[in-house]
């Protein structure tokens, strides 16, 4: 609960500061946000290996499958019970198991 409250305070402060910025300052913030998102994506991508069993929220609801390929930002997942392959951002995946058969 305390961590959640601190995060909310940070967001509130950041939003307040953003409203006070000019265009150049906003551009700097946008660049910093993009760099942080890229860093988080790279961290997330390292959590997966080919063969891992994962789940994700797809267009048709919850889906699960096996990791068949790992790219720089996206993971290719073969859906369980079908030949459908999904290109999923790493931050949308939840690891369910390691190297099990799909």
Image: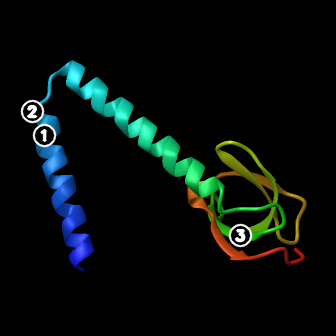
- Secondary structure category for the residue under label 3: strand
Mark 2 in CB contact with mark 1 (< 8 angstroms)? yes
Q: Is residue 8 above or below residue 70?
A: below
Q: Position of residue 46 (x, y in %)?
A: 66, 56
Q: Which mark is residue 90?
A: none
Q: Which mark is residue 54?
A: 3
Disc 1 designates what residue?
17
Mark 3 in CB contact with mark 1 (< 8 angstroms)? no
Few, some or many residues within 10 Å of mark 3 (<14, 14–19, 20+): many
> How far is mark 2 from mark 1, CA to CA?
5 Å
Left or right, 6 with respect to 82, comes to: left
The earlier-in-sequence mark between 3 and 1 is 1
Residue at 12% in and 40% down: 17
Left or right, 30 with respect to 94, comes to: left
Q: Position of residue 36 (x, y in %)?
A: 42, 43
Residue at 23% in and 19% down: 24
Mark 3 in CB contact with mark 2 (< 8 angstroms)? no
Few, some or many residues within 10 Å of mark 1 (<14, 14–19, 20+): few
Quadrant of residue 47 in the image?
bottom right
Residue at 43% in and 36% down: 34
Disc 2 designates what residue?
20
Q: Position of residue 4 (x, y in %)?
A: 26, 71
């Amino acid at each position: 609960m305390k961590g959640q409250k601190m995060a909310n305070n940070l967001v509130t402060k950041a939003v307040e500061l953003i409203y006070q910025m000019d265009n150049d300052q906003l551009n700097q913030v946008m660049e910093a946000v993009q760099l942080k998102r890229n860093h988080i994506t790279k961290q997330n991508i390292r959590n997966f290996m080919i063969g891992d069993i994962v789940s994700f929220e797809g267009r048709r609801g919850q889906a699960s499958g096996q990791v068949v390929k790992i790219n720089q930002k996206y993971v290719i997942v073969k859906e369980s019970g079908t030949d459908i392959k999904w290109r999923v951002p790493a931050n949308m995946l939840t690891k369910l198991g390691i190297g099990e058969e799909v």
